[in-house]
Amino acid sequence: MSSLKVPASVPDPYEDAEQLKKAFKGWGTNEDLIIQILAHRNAAQRKLIRDSYAAAYGEDLLKDLDSELSSDFQRVVLLWTLSPAERDAYLVNEATKRLTASNWVIMETACTRSSDDLFKARQAYHARYKKSLEEDVAYHTSGDFRKLLIPLITAFRYEGDEVNMTLARKEANILHEKISDKAYNDEEIIRIISTRSKAQLSATFNHYNDHHGHEIIKDLEADDDDDEYLKLLRAAIECLKTPEKYFEKVLRLAIKKLGTDEWDLTRVVATRAEVDMERIKEEYHRRNSVTLDRAIAADTSGDYEKMLLALIGHGDA
């Protein structure tokens, strides 16, 4: 469920494009107008605005935003204005670069998108980078990380609700056996979490908890202090199981850091605003006894703050 406030009347994309062009004119950029328009348009409407802008002015809206804006505000506006598939392709590509490398962003994208969304991201990657997403991930990772990430990022899971309980019991026992043996990189663990539907995995994880007396996440916590692969595996399971808990933790750590981690904060808000932000906000409030909008307002400022609050549904812009 989207937390975005969309005006009751359907906005005219040509009018929006015209207003954005006006926002760029004169001595200074009208950031409030940019927020007022873009933060309150859904993905389909933003695509129409980009198309209308190109048709009317022969220019790329993204390039104009890039040249007119700066800093964290620029990044959140650009990520938001991209289509979800383009955005995911961009984030994964960035995560394979040496200076911005992040196995976590790759894992997060792989485990929290629907099968169709992940497939569209891989198509967008082809179109933009003239190579496949998985070849870049494979080239820029190694060892156990590659062994885990490639099947996750190339998965095309069944999206229905049908569950095989016999299989869930069997695979819960396999997972428990491998985890008890500390065989965290075992191909059976990777096979199960990278191929089964999320509904099937939910049944498997529930059986694991019921039959073995611990949540699978808890059993994976014991040895992970210095084991980066194990931390990533545990986070992947959290993403597949309860994504709102995973994203709440990313936001909490980003905001509570000495010096906010704007990259994580920006990424989560931009990628989840139209997906499950309401659930993330509820989880954040439950876990921290403060609302997410108040936490963001206390830790950010200016146009960046206004854009973030508008995207999570509490902005006045």
Image (tube, rainbow, N blue to C red):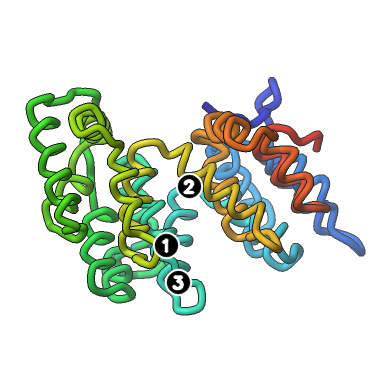
Q: CA distance from mark 1 to mark 3?
A: 9 Å
Of pointers 1 and 3, the one earlier in the residue sequence: 1
The residue closer to the viewer here, 138 or 189, is 189
Number of other residues with Cα within 10 Å of mark 3, as a class: few under 14, some 14 to 19, many 20 or more = some
In the rendered image, residue 274, in percent from the top left (x then y), is placed at 54, 36
Indicate the secondary structure of the residue bearing disc 2. Answer: helix
In the image, what residue occupies the spot 49% across and 35% down? 275
For the C terminus, the image quarter is top right
State the image coordinates of residue 36 (x, y, percent, origin top left).
Answer: 77, 40
User: Which label sits on residue 92?
Assistant: 1
Element on which disc 3 rests: loop
Q: Nearer the viewer, residue 310 or 130?
A: 310
Residue under the image location 58 percent in, 42 percent down: 48
Where does label 2 land, which residue? 84
- Residue found 44% across the figure and 66% down from its top: 102
Is 198 in front, or is 260? 260
Amino acid, disc 2: Pro
Around disc 2, counting alpha carbons within 10 Å, would you say few (fewer than 14), some (14 to 19), or many (20 or more)?
Answer: many
Residue at the far bottom: name it.
98
Tell me the crowding category of disc 1: few under 14, some 14 to 19, or many 20 or more residues within 10 angstroms, Cα based: many
Between 50 and 268, which is closer to the camera in this rendering?
268
Rendered position, 28 above or below 309: below
225 in relation to 192, above or below: below
Image coords of residue 72 (percent x, y): 70, 61
Residue 109 in view, yes or no: yes
* Label 2 to label 3: alpha-carbon separation: 20 Å
Q: Nearer the viewer, mark 2 or mark 3?
A: 3
Q: Which mark is residue 65?
A: none
Where disc 1 sits, the SS reads: helix
Residue lying farthest to the top in this orientation: 8
Per the rendering, the mark at residue 101 is 3
For the residue marked with disc 3, what is the amino acid?
Answer: Ala
